[in-house]
Image: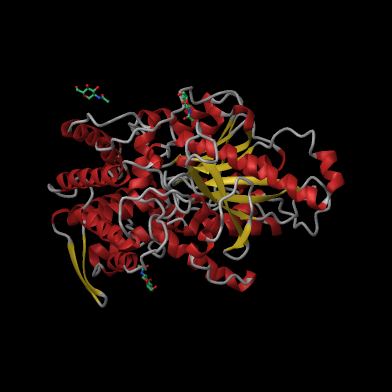
Amino acid sequence: MYFPFSLAFAVWDAILGESVSLSKSTQLQQPEPDSLIWDQIAPSTDLHFHSCYTGFECARLDVPLDWNKTSSSAARAAVAIVKLPAQVDVNDPRYGGSILINPGGPGGSGVNLALLHGRNIQRIVDSPISPDESLANGEKYFDIIGFDPRSVGFTTPSFTCFSDPQQRRSWQIASEADGLLGSSDAALGRMWARKHALAETCYAEMGDEAISFAMNTPVVAMDMVAIVDSLSRWRRQSIQTTHPIRSSQTWMKDDPDKLQYWGFSYGTLLGQTFASMYPHLVGRVVLDGVVDSDRHYSGTWDGNIVDADAIIQRFSVYCYEAGPERCDLFSEKGPASIQSSLDSILASVRDRPKSVSSTKGPEIITYSDVEILIRDALYGPFKAFENLAIALQDLASGDGSFIASLKQNQTSLKVPSGPPDYAEEVVGSISCSDGADQTNMTESEFVEYWHKARRQSRYLGDRWSQNRLQCIFWKFRPQFTHSGPIGVQTEPILFIGNTLDPVTSIENARRMNHKFPGSKLLQQESEGHISLSTPSLCTAKVVRAYFQSGVLPDHETSCQVYELPFGLPGERAPVPLDKGDKILLEALRTIANQMW
Ligand SMILES: *[C@@H]1O[C@H](CO)[C@@H](O)[C@H](O)[C@H]1NC(C)=O
Ligand SMILES: *[C@@H]1O[C@H](CO)[C@@H](O)[C@H](O)[C@H]1NC(C)=O
Ligand SMILES: *[C@@H]1O[C@H](CO)[C@@H](O)[C@H](O)[C@H]1NC(C)=O
């Protein structure tokens, strides 16, 4: 589906990696094992934050599992919440409140996103003036809040159809070896059988669990209301304890706190759903990499990938501009020739995978492996274009050891002991529960859908269409759905779309922007999924100004990026950077470089 941030195991490794590299400046140590943190926190209806992961605070919010059965004796869920505290105290007039974030998927962990990128996201939204130097009340500093949606990450109860992490890993490796749709004559039959087996197992193991019917997006929106509300109570209590007089002056007549939110990818669907269900609770909301809510809720997910192939054309153009030094696939004959070598290298492994003998052990490189690399490059070109060129060139005229090493590095990562990010059955369950019942779809109807997706994108259609396959076998239906329309009058929302985004096209962003009267659309002139996939000072400053003071661009605006893939310069007339810009650019680069 729509995954902007690293998939599966990679994110775990990346969390450790970030902690290690940050340790020089902020004395972060290796994080404690996650189970020690979360198991020790008792869920509560008022937030009690405990320090965790060095520099963060964790809490578990107790909510009803079924929002129609709110008594404390009915079944409950506990939402895992991690807070990166603001740079100023909640008592400080410059405290700007909390900004919730969601990484997409569905099935992505907001806790992991906050741990991995929270600090840099905070650098984007906060005033560039350090709190020691800013005395005026105009500057704002925010808490960044990551939460795990229902059935995701450390939120309980969990939804899982594997008995242990090792079993899941084996299944995943075997599924990858079966290959993407279209990679062989056997691939469709195998994937069909696998999705069938997965759905049946989930049905047998989780069929009696209430969570199986209460993890779709509108229910998560209801949980978000509870999060906003509990944060607001927590803030009042903090102020009351330390400033009893001020609290009675400023707080008692206040309106309820509203949602401040930056949602990415599927997180934009969550944001649109929240806004449509609770328009009066919309504060400042940024929806970045916009999902088409109609296609999502209808369960077809078609039409999202129409811009994907144009990104590969841009790959060839940038490669040509970058030259042989920076792009291994460079040809002086020009971009068309570069793209045709990409195509012929891809085709060359279709029937004959490449054999690689490496010091780690034997490996083969298949058509699916190359398609996955291309897919990663479409999502995060800023870093992945260069790797794609190295990998393809190595496959064509080298020994294939580069891709072999990537694959081996992926599989030799330690199996995470905690809950996985983007678990296959969770991604499927949320998507299938949101969409219409598909259990009547026949194999030939599915093949027709797949071929249509391939016509929309020959590089992404195979991977994209398999999202829908699980729903053909998915029998769980949600007990609660949002029956109203998506799109209402709210405080203005900021929509952001890239000119060429592989899975959330700019057309989606335009359509959704029209559904919310008064909202504004910012187009970032770049390739890749979500704005953070390429550093843009311009976009970051628009987001910052909106969170700082509610200012939005006029009508439809566009932003250039500061730098392009292969180290090419971005903005036509680069602005001279002041100290604040340098810090901002560093934050943006770090996020873009870690995205894939
Ligand atoms: C695989 O991991 C090793 C050891 O960390 C690293 O040196 C190597 O560059 C990695 N391979 C690739 C292709 O990234
Ligand atoms: C599936 O097909 C059966 C038999 O034709 C029909 O009764 C049922 O309503 C269909 N279900 C859906 C969800 O379309
Ligand atoms: C609560 O119950 C009513 C009546 O059965 C139903 O219409 C509504 O969708 C339910 N709400 C939730 C959140 O389950």
Q: Count the labels in the image.
A: 0
- Which residue occupies 76% across, 34% down? 254
Q: Is residue 571 visible?
A: no
Q: Is residue 592 visible?
A: yes
Visual colour scheme: secondary structure
Q: Give the percent coordinates (x, y) of residue 78.
A: 51, 48
Q: Viewed as shown, does residue 222 lie left or right of 213?
A: right
Q: Viewed as shown, does residue 538 lie left or right of 532?
A: right
- Which residue occupies 68% across, 42% down? 232
**Which quarter shows the C terminus?**
bottom left
Quadrant of the rendered structure where residue 549 is? top right
Residue lying farthest to the right in this orientation: 245
Nearest the camera: 548 or 224? 224
Nearest the camera: 253 or 123? 253
Residue lying farthest to the bottom in this orientation: 359
Q: Give the percent coordinates (x, y) of residue 563.
A: 53, 54
Nearest the camera: 89 or 386? 89
- Which residue occupies 38% across, 52% down? 377
Image region (quadrant) for ligand 2: top left
Q: Give the percent coordinates (x, y) of residue 141.
A: 71, 50
Q: Give the percent coordinates (x, y) of residue 494.
A: 59, 35
Is 407 situated above or below 262? below
**Which quarter shows the N terminus?**
top left
Quadrant of the rendered structure where residue 305 is? top left
